[in-house]
Image (cartoon, grey):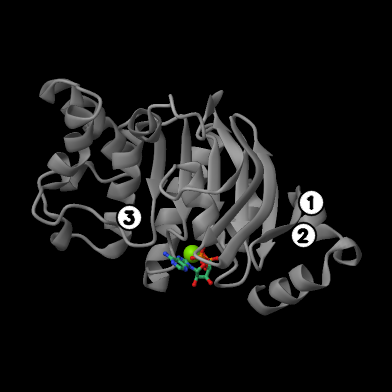
Amino acid sequence: MIDIKNISKWYGSFQVLTDCTTTIKKGEVVVVCGPSGSGKSTLIKTVNALEPFQKGDIVVDGISLSDPKTNLPKLRSRVGMVFQHFELFPHLSVTENLTLAQIKVLGRSKDDAIVRGLKMLERVGLSAHKDKFPGQLSGGQQQRVAIARALSMDPMVMLFDEPTSALDPEMVGEVLDVMVKLAEEGMTMMCVTHEMGFAKKVSNRVIFMDAGKIIEDCNKDSFFGNADERSPRAKDFLSKIL
Ligand code: ADP
Ligand code: MG
């Protein structure tokens, strides 16, 4: 589904990503972790073509991001993205937040968009809040609306960038529950998160990044299981967060 091939990226003279390569298959859940500043957000944004890269290529569902003929806005519309800050439109109701891009980007009728959006709102357990504004919801609820909004676009893959790290602790669980459910339903997911409970429960693979490089890319059991095989940096990182 996603083929990241030897990606390197610079911000000016600063190399933020160095020769990153990995593949995410359909239905796989891959967790990306690593210290702050290691390039996790940058990597995940390149997948969505929100950040350009200077070397290598990324192929999403058979479409090359570096091919000038690729319609990036169209591709992006099929890649769901959920950020740390919920980024809902504050002046629009929950339902309007759910339907805007469906109507503007996918060209759906308002009625179709509402049906689809409310179905996704139900999936995240927030049907009762459809007429509220984001400011009337808790942080956890806003993040669940952001997930429902992304799902309303029928994404072929969902990217998450630390979706729970800005939340009060008591709200983390409700967002993780939604993500676990999505994973169990077979959604292809690439998740930057330090929630190792989530990684242990539903991920297939864990990628560990440090200083712009993918240091480890292995299945969950070997990442959490065999400390002897782990790189010293990953060991050190895990010892700090587990
Ligand atoms: P992470 O998500 O792992 O914390 P980021 O991908 O956000 O890491 O950032 C990786 C590195 O790139 C950091 O050193 C950060 O300061 C730098 N960086 C991020 N965005 C920019 C930018 N727009 N311009 C210059 N440097 C940036
Ligand atoms: Mg980040």
Describe the element under mark 2 as helix, strand or loop. helix
Q: From this viewpoint, which residue is outermost toward the right?
A: 228
The residue sitting at 76% across, 72% down in the picture is: 233
Q: Measure how far apart labels 1 and 2 are at the Cα level.
A: 5 Å
Residues at marks 1 and 2 touching, judged by CB atoms closer than 8 Å: yes
Kindly identify which numbered label has been placed on residue 221: 1
Question: Which residue in the protein does label 3 denote?
Answer: 143
Disc count in the image?
3
Q: Is mark 1 within 8 Å of ligand 1?
A: no
Answer with left or right where residue 10 lies relative to residue 88: right
> How far apart in space, not on screen, are marks 3 and 1 (Cα)?
29 Å
Near-viewer residue (20 or 156)? 20
Look at the picture and state if 206 lies above or below 148.
Answer: below
Q: Position of residue 6 (x, y in %)?
A: 68, 45
Comparing 20 with 202, the one in front is: 20
**Residue at 56% across / 68% down in the picture?**
14
Q: Is residue 141 left or right of residue 45?
A: left
Q: Which residue sits at x=38%, y=27%? A: 71
User: Can you say whether 112 is above or below 39 in the image?
Assistant: above
Residue 214 horizontal side relative to residue 146, left or right: right
Ligand 2 under 8 Å from disc 3 Cβ? no
Residue occupied by mark 2? 224
Q: Nearer the viewer, residue 144 or 23?
A: 23
* Whether label 3 touches label 1, CB < 8 Å: no
